[in-house]
Image: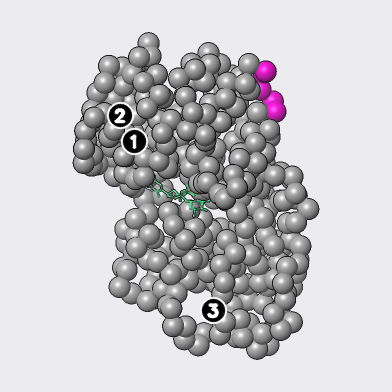
């Protein structure tokens, strides 16, 4: 009999919580034949990346996943075989009672945040709290052997490579988005939080010897883009040129299209968790705007990733990449590090490709979860 999974997602802010759980839910259905219910407390955030979502409905099916609105007032529900609380969200107390009352004990896991830090390996799959005999486990995604790996759909890298080798497929995709970059220009994407360092980067791009076409999905960074352009009320479809730089605002697209967008670009600025991983699968150089945390603990996470990611680079390329990422995450001056990075572009590009293939050798997160469940029963 198919295993039944319940995934609980509380949308704290932004799109990462729903982005990760929606991707995981679909993959469990498509790649592993599981029965999945995805409980989401905010269907509006979900609708942005999956426009078919009907925000009025408490129960609906999307791509083989049973999507349930997680109501403030919980009504009695039987527990599944496997229960995932995403990002330490608290399950409804009545649901926990249902887990404890169930004949066969369910496997209960907390799906944690992604981090490249070393301690993650030691904590992955460890028991956490217990509720009336039901044991909860930590499950950590990660880049290192001994972690739960990264979300990666079956065949993703092959699809990406085929698309990147198919110039007309890329052109058609971009045309559908209304994107027509000038021949020879460097296509880049920018998905970021507010960042006071942006102006110095845009200045550098505008005065660069090579033209850049920068795609900016609607979102939090638009205020800084507007300030730099000296305009107001930017919306999807707007295109502005300043010297060598064309800035184009595009609509927030569905997740699959966002992947293709990343695959088309020579360089991607991404943020949070899920877009960060997707940019790595794109096999192209990237810049990460990490989600800011209290007491700057996010900077430790940033350093841990940089240490892993740049380990195989030459000293010059490593220094350039680290300088750029650190400037971006401290809202510093981007001009000099960007110029340094351009000097190492071929190496950094080759490395992005090699990194994606190397990470692709690890078991993906959904498979690791299924394997954990199978070894547990
Ligand atoms: O939206 P985010 O900033 O989410 C963050 C992080 O997950 C962070 O770790 C968490 O603590 C915080 O939320 C609460 O960035 P992230 O993780 O990249 O999620 C964005 C999602 O949006 C991702 O699934 C990709 C998707 N997306 C689209 O589907 N279409 C688009 O056009 C764009 C730009 C993104």
Nearer mark to the viewer, of 3 and 2: 2
Task: Tell me if residue 313 is in the magenta stretch.
Answer: yes
Mark 3–mark 1 Cα distance, whole angstroms, equals 40 Å
Residue farthest to the front, as pictured: 295
Decide which of 289, 154 is in the foreground and name it.
Answer: 289
Segment tinted magenta in the rendering = 311-315
Asked whether residue 66 is in view, the answer is: no
Nearer mark to the viewer, of 3 and 1: 1
Mark 3–mark 2 Cα distance, whole angstroms, equals 46 Å
Q: Is residue 161 left or right of residue 205?
A: right
Task: Tell me if residue 243 is in the magenta stretch.
Answer: no
Instruction: Looking at the image, tell me whether mark 3 or mark 1 is earlier in sequence order.
Output: 3
Structural crowding at the residue carrying mark 1, measured as other residues with C-alpha within 10 Å and reported as few (<14), some (14–19) or many (≥20): some
In which quadrant of the rendered image does the N terminus lie? bottom right
Question: Which residue is at a point 26% across and 28% down the rendered structure image?
Answer: 229
Q: Position of residue 344 (x, y in %)?
A: 56, 16
Q: Position of residue 38 (x, y in %)?
A: 48, 69
Q: Which residue is mark 3?
A: 92
**Tag 2 and tag 1, C-beta contact below 8 Å:** yes
Q: Which residue is mark 1?
A: 224
**Tag 3 and tag 2, C-beta contact below 8 Å:** no
Q: Position of residue 330 (x, y in %)?
A: 52, 34
Q: Which residue is mark 2?
A: 228
Question: Which residue is at a point 62% across and 58% down the rendered structure image?
Answer: 112
Q: Which mark is residue 4?
A: none
Q: Is residue 357 left or right of residue 276?
A: right
Q: Does residue 67 sit above or below 239 in this rendering?
A: below
| Helix, strand or loop for the magenta stretch, by majority | loop
């Amino acid at each position: 009999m198919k295993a039944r999974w319940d995934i609980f997602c509380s949308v704290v802010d932004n799109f990462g919580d729903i982005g990760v759980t929606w991707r995981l839910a679909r993959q469990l259905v498509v790649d592993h034949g599981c029965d999945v219910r995805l409980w989401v407390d905010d269907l509006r955030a979900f609708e942005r990346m999956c426009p078919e979502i009907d925000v009025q409905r408490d129960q609906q099916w999307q791509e083989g996943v049973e999507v349930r609105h997680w109501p403030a007032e919980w009504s009695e529900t039987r527990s599944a075989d496997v229960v995932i609380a995403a990002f330490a969200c608290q399950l409804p107390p009545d649901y926990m009672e249902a887990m404890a009352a169930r004949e066969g004990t369910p496997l209960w896991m907390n799906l944690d945040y992604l981090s490249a830090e070393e301690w993650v390996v030691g904590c992955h799959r460890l028991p956490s709290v217990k509720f009336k005999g039901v044991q909860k486990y930590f499950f950590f995604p990660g880049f290192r052997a001994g972690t739960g790996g990264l979300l990666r759909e079956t065949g993703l890298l092959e699809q990406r490579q085929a698309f990147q080798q198919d110039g007309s497929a890329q052109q058609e995709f971009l045309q559908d988005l209304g994107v027509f970059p000038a021949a020879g220009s460097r296509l880049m994407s920018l998905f970021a939080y507010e960042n006071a360092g942006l102006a110095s980067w845009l200045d550098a791009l505008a005065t660069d010897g090579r033209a850049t076409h920068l795609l900016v999905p609607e979102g939090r960074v638009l205020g800084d883009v507007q300030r730099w352009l000296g305009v107001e009320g930017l919306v999807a479809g707007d295109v502005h040129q300043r010297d060598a730089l064309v800035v184009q605002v595009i609509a927030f697209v569905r997740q699959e299209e966002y992947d293709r967008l990343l695959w088309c670009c020579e360089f991607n600025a991404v943020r949070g968790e899920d877009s960060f991983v997707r940019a790595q699968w794109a096999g192209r150089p990237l810049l990460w705007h990490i989600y800011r945390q209290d007491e700057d603990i996010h900077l430790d996470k940033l350093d841990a990733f940089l240490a892993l990611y740049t380990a195989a680079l030459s000293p010059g390329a490593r220094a350039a990449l680290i300088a750029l990422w650190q400037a971006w995450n401290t809202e510093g001056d981007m001009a000099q590090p960007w110029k340094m990075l351009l000097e190492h572009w071929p190496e950094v590009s080759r490395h992005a490709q090699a990194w994606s293939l190397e990470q692709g050798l690890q078991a993906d997160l959904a498979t690791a979860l299924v394997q954990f469940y199978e070894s547990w029963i």
